[in-house]
Image (cartoon, rainbow, N blue to C red):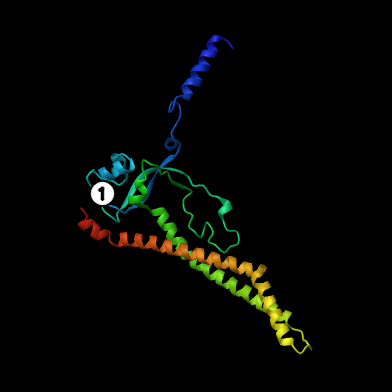
């Protein structure tokens, strides 16, 4: 390698090591999309722009507004250009038994999500992503279906356990103390079936039912907020300053 080639190579290495030189930030690597949000905490466009680090002109253009002092009241729908990134799906977290809602039942929605960092975290505090809100409503509607499916499965397994117990006890004893012996054996059988494979399936289903019930409460609270904002949007528009 001659001296000129060495100098060029050294220059390229040096420039490549300078932070920001020839390197794109994560945001630049992500695409920009206009997403529809529901305003949670009202404010004027100028202050909203400062909070979420999106230029005023872009917000005005996306919503066909002209005044930077326009107040986006609680419950108003606002289009905001934001950086997005591909939504990562982890198949290891999916339940393959069919007891929990699938990605489709959860309303997985779009295959991308907003890029949130320290510069625009207010986007999560002051706004609600309407795409996610719709997914929440869809998931909420499907959770009851899966809880009913779990109850049906638990009842079936319980019936199987009871049937097996009946089969095991279809024999006679001539011993004078047969009732005592049968009682002890029944307790032993009960313990086996409750703690055995069928019992463990029932326990697992009950745990999943509890988890779904907790998720249902979270979704119901979120949906209640969405509904409140939408229902009171007219009042907010007239009175919010």
Where residue 173 sits, quadrant-wise, is bottom right
- Residue 85: % across, % down: 46, 43
Classify the position of the N terminus by image quarter.
Answer: top right
Q: Residue at x 45, y 39 (%)?
A: 30
Which of the pair 224/70 is nearer the observer?
224
In front of the other: 34 or 113: 113
> Badge 1 local density, few (<14 within 10 Å), some, or many (20+)?
some
Classify 32 as above or below 193.
above
Q: Is residue 8 left or right of residue 50?
A: right
The residue located at (26%, 44%) in the rendering is 47
In this view, the residue farthest toward the right is: 174
What secondary structure is found at the residue carrying circle 1?
A: strand
Task: Give the answer, above or below, for where 176 lies relative to 215.
Answer: below
Decide if residue 155 is on the left or right side of residue 214: right
Counting every numbered tag in the picture gives 1
Residue at the image point whose x is 49% and y is 54% from the top? 108
Q: Quick check: 61 above or below 145?
A: above
Left or right placement of residue 65 versus residue 184 in this view = left
Between 165 and 4, the one nearer to me in the picture: 165
Q: Position of residue 172 (x, y in %)?
A: 77, 86
Residue annotated with mark 1: 43
Up-down: is 125 above or below 4? below
- Return the residue nearer the eye: 214 or 149: 214
Residue lying at the far top in this picture: please name it: 3
- Looking at the image, which residue is at 38% across and 48% down? 35
Please provide percent x and percent y for residue 86: 49, 44
Which of the 4 quarters of the picture holds residue 76?
A: bottom left
Q: Position of residue 241 (x, y in %)?
A: 20, 52
């Amino acid at each position: 390698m001659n001296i000129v080639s060495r100098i060029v190579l050294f220059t390229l290495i040096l420039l490549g090591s300078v932070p920001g030189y020839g390197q794109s930030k994560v945001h630049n690597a992500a695409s920009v999309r206009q997403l529809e949000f529901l305003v949670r905490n009202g404010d004027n466009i100028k202050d909203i722009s400062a909070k979420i680090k999106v230029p005023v002109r872009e917000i005005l253009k996306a919503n066909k507004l002209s005044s930077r002092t326009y107040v986006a009241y609680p419950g108003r729908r606002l289009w905001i250009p934001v950086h997005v990134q591909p939504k990562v799906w982890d198949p290891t977290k999916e339940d393959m038994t069919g007891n929990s809602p699938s990605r489709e039942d959860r309303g997985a929605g779009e295959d991308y999500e907003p890029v949130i960092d320290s510069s625009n975290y207010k986007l999560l505090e002051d706004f609600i992503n309407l795409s996610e809100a719709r997914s929440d409503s869809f998931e909420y509607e499907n959770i009851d279906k899966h809880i009913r499916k779990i109850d049906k499965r638990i009842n079936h397994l319980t019936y199987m356990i009871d049937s097996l117990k009946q089969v095991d006890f279809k024999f006679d004893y001539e011993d004078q103390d047969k009732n005592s012996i049968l009682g002890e054996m029944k307790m032993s059988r009960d313990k086996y079936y409750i703690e055995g494979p069928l019992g463990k399936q029932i326990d697992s289903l009950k745990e999943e039912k509890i988890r779904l019930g907790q998720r249902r409460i979270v979704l119901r609270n979120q949906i209640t907020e969405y509904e409140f904002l939408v229902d009171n949007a007219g009042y907010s528009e007239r009175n919010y300053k």
